[in-house]
Image (cartoon, helix red, strand yellow):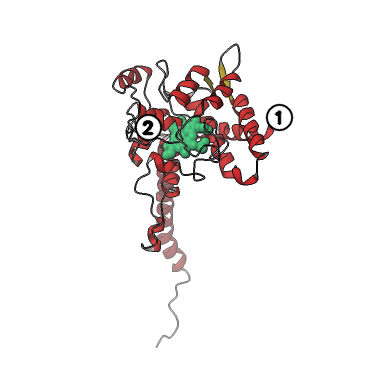
Amino acid sequence: MDTKPPQTSEQAPVCTCGAVKPKSNKAKKWLKYVVVILSLSAVYFITKKPSQRLTMTHEEWDIFIKDHPYEAPAADAFRSPCPFLNTFANHGILPRSGNATYDDYYRAMTIAGTTPSVTKSFLNSVFYAYKEINPSESIWSDLHKAPYVTFQHIGQHNILEHDISLTRLDAAQEPDFTIPNAERIQSIIDTADKSTSMVGEKQLSDFRRGKWNEAAARPRSTYHFGLFFQFTSAMECVLLLDYLGHDHQISVDHLESFTLKERIPDDWYPLEQPLTTMNLIKRTRSCFMSVRKSKA
Ligand code: HEM
């Protein structure tokens, strides 16, 4: 009886290579295709413009705004500490009542020129920030967003609304966040470049720094302007200069119309193309640093 193991030493290389090598080549080829397809789709999705265009051309805006005339808010309407939200509500682009849904905010912001991704990130944070915890519900309910956020909610102090604002007195001086302060707005207008009548980052930063210094001279309990609010106020500087204004500046007429009258100026247009995320980041950083560097 032959007990020797089968003589495979000569066959093995032929057999194994013959069976495995073409298979691994095939697998490598497929892997290459998959990587190429995935990379191309990634490039496509990153660079593709949103299928639905949300900004408007000047011509489209002219037609749109004719259907959205200014009306002063009704006595029972809510108003917020945000000049943009109030202005858009006074024109019925946001609900005139001040009871806006996530979709209403989304539409208004993207009309003004924020990108879909920036808008979603911002609104998701807002809807989480204003979620009130109900102690009788499960702890998991804490993880849900607020079902709605009215203009009145937005005014709750030290969630988004903060001290050292451009258009409102600090909460300790004027608890009604809906009232723009005419004197404060006039002081910003007075800083405008005399030849162009434009207000830019330096003027806003000097103004904010001046108000910050004044607040710091008061008793400590009467104001708060922590790091988070320094950051959000830098974003508001960009919102004012690049969305309500354009190219990082705003004319005194437009500033007064949006912030004091809360009315869209007749000769104003929203951005025709959204401000890129990179520009938003760069300009926010610049506004942030500008207040810290200000010698006002
Ligand atoms: C593109 C859209 C928007 C623009 C152009 C805009 C513009 C502005 C500006 C210029 C300010 C500064 C006012 C000041 O310092 O007195 C401001 C403040 C504020 N905005 Fe908006 N905003 C926008 C969207 C929103 C949205 C969607 C919300 C919330 C849902 C919001 C909530 C606020 C709040 C709470 C303040 C008050 C901050 C403070 O206390 O100074 N804004 N906004």
The image position of residue 13, as x and y in percent, is 47, 65
Q: Residue furthest top?
A: 195
Horizontal side of 103 relative to 38 (left or right) equals: left
Residue 108, numbered label: 2
Quarter of the view holding residue 17 = bottom left
Q: CA distance from mark 1 to mark 2?
A: 36 Å
Secondary structure beneath dot 2 equals helix
Q: Position of residue 232 (x, y in %)?
A: 54, 39
Please determine whether, in this image, residue 83 is positioned above or below residue 124: above
Question: On the image, numbered disc 1 is attached to which residue?
Answer: 295
Q: Residues within 10 Å of mark 1 (few under 14, many from 20)?
A: few
Q: Does residue 56 appear left or right of residue 242 in this picture? A: left
Within 10 Å of disc 2 (Cα), the crowding (few <14, some 14-19, many 20+) is many
CB at disc 2 and ligand 1 closer than 8 Å? yes
Q: Secondary structure at mark 1?
A: loop
Disc count in the image? 2
Q: Residue 182 placed where, x, y %?
A: 51, 25
Q: Nearer the viewer, residue 195 or 182?
A: 182
